Image (spheres, rainbow, N blue to C red):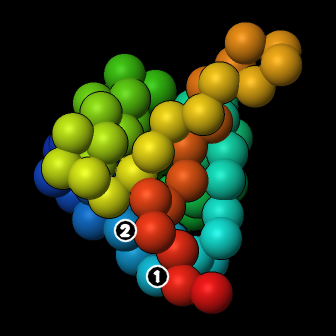
Amino acid sequence: MKEPSVAETVQAILDYLRKNPKAQDTLPGIVQWWLTDLPVKPRAATVKQALDKLVCDGFLSEHKGKDAQISYRMKNPPP
């Protein structure tokens, strides 16, 4: 099986966030925990491209923690 494309990874992230709208995690956490429904885990570089697209499109926001790690979460999660 081949690695998911950026578009497929974007869709998997959006699917995860529909089920978990208040989720927030770093790139390594997203690779490990958010994409478990995909048959093949995408490379971190592919996930990063997908996250960048979602940030650029206004779906996600980036937050720099005290430890300087970047975490991602839905820009406007439901209450």
Mark drawn on residue 14: 2
Amino acid type at circle 2 is Leu
x and y, in percent, of residue 19 in the image: 55, 84
Secondary structure at badge 1 equals: helix
Q: Is residue 29 left or right of residue 19?
A: right
x and y, in percent, of residue 63 in the image: 60, 34
Q: Is residue 27 above or below residue 6?
A: above
Residue at horizontal 30%, vertical 33%? 52
Query: Residue 15 sits in which quadrant?
Result: bottom left
**Residue 2 seen in the current view:** no
x and y, in percent, of residue 69 in the image: 70, 19
Amino acid type at circle 1 is Arg
x and y, in percent, of residue 14 in the image: 37, 68
Q: Is residue 34 above or below residue 63?
A: below
Mark 2 Cα shell of 10 Å, populated few (<14), some (14-19), many (≥20):
some
**Residue 76 seen in the current view:** yes
Query: In the image shown, does 40 or 43 lie closer to the viewer?
Result: 43
Secondary structure at badge 2 equals: helix
In the picture, the quarter occupied by the C terminus is bottom right
Mark 1 Cα shell of 10 Å, populated few (<14), some (14-19), many (≥20):
some
Residue at horizontal 21%, vertical 39%? 56
Query: In the image shown, does 62 or 18 lie closer to the viewer?
Result: 62
Query: Residue 67 sits in which quadrant?
Result: top right
Query: In the image shown, does 61 or 4 lie closer to the viewer?
Result: 61
Q: CA distance from mark 1 to mark 2?
A: 6 Å
Q: Is residue 17 above or below residue 61?
A: below
- Mark 1 lies on residue: 18
Residue at horizontal 46%, vertical 82%? 18
Are the two marked residues, 1 and 2, in contact with CB atoms closer than 8 angstroms?
yes
Q: Is residue 1 left or right of residue 14?
A: left
Query: In the image shown, does 73 or 49 lie closer to the viewer?
Result: 73
Mark drawn on residue 72: none
